[in-house]
Amino acid sequence: MRLALRRKARRAQGSAGKETAGKASGGRSPRRPPRPVSRERYRRRRLAAALSALLLFVGLGLTGRVLLYDLGLADVQDVRVTGAAVVPVRDVLAAAAVTPGGPLAAVDLAGVANRVARLPAVESVRVGRDWPHTVAVELTERVPVAIARNGEGPQLVDRSGVVYPGEPVPGIPTLTVPTLGTDDPAVLAAVAVLAAVPEPLRGQVLTVRAGPAGSEATGAAAAPAPPGGLAPQVTLGLTDDREVRWGGPERGEEKAGVLLPLLGQTGHRYDVSSPELPTIRP
């Protein structure tokens, strides 16, 4: 009996000692301070990470090469042309010269765009890839504002003064200039005046004549003006045998504002070359 009581007392003392030690240490066992990472070990880790990233990049590149070039999963099967109203689509396809069956990723988009842009009636072109099998060609065609004729047949003139061959377009005026050519001063003056003509009058313009000062009085285009001469003078022929002496292309907004009310008065020859002093002649 005494032996059992002694054992019980010893157990109680052991438990009390453990509890006191736990409270003294905050209930946590002491930790060792972290070992510092050596510079050499840190360098090896960075090198291993760089090598892993490089291997991943190479693997992805090889996978992409196989998918896009070798397996034929993204080969060219079609060339889609949009925006072609006047330009024949067959001419666009011939100029694009895209080889069917080749990898879509290998198509030289800039080369295709440059070739298509050489078509006379094309103002601008955009070329892109429409994955997985199509080359997309988007055209912006030139907008003719006048038609002229020379030894090569009908020539259209667009809003920027570019002259190009094309079929006659109904509803645009006939242009007469001393020398027909892209960026010719008389051509540029004529298209600038046509752009300034008020919208309600544009459908009434039948002819536009541009040339050096004095040519508008004769009713025919004169010889080209010498370098440093006056700006080309423009004359418009309207319906009902009316004529408008516009003068130079400058001050177009003022001249347009004067012309509209002036045409409401009886006459056949209207002069707005000096918008502050417009005149009417029978």
Image: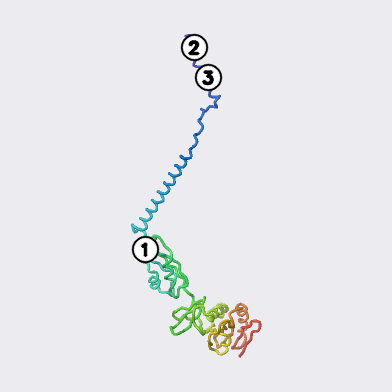
**Residue occupied by mark 3:** 17
x, y percent for residue 120 = 44, 75
Which quadrant of the structure image shows residue 216? bottom right
- The mark found on residue 134 in the picture is none
x, y percent for residue 154 = 45, 82
Horizontally, is 196 left or right of 147 in the view?
right
For this rendering, which residue is in front, 119 or 206? Answer: 119
Q: Earlier in the sequence, mark 3 or mark 2?
A: 2
Q: Earlier in the sequence, mark 2 or mark 1?
A: 2
**Residue occupied by mark 2:** 6
Q: Could you give the CA–CA distance between mark 2 and mark 1, rounded to whole angstroms?
A: 96 Å
x, y percent for residue 7 = 48, 13
Q: Secondary structure at mark 3?
A: helix
Which residue does the image show at 62% across and 89% down from the upper left? 281
Horizontally, is 159 left or right of 89 in the view?
right
Horizontally, is 130 left or right of 276 in the view?
left
**Residue occupied by mark 1:** 76
Q: Could you give the CA–CA distance between mark 3 and mark 1, rounded to whole angstroms?
A: 84 Å
For this rendering, which residue is in front, 28 or 43? Answer: 43
x, y percent for residue 261 = 62, 82
Which residue does the image show at 53% across and 22% down from the upper left? 21
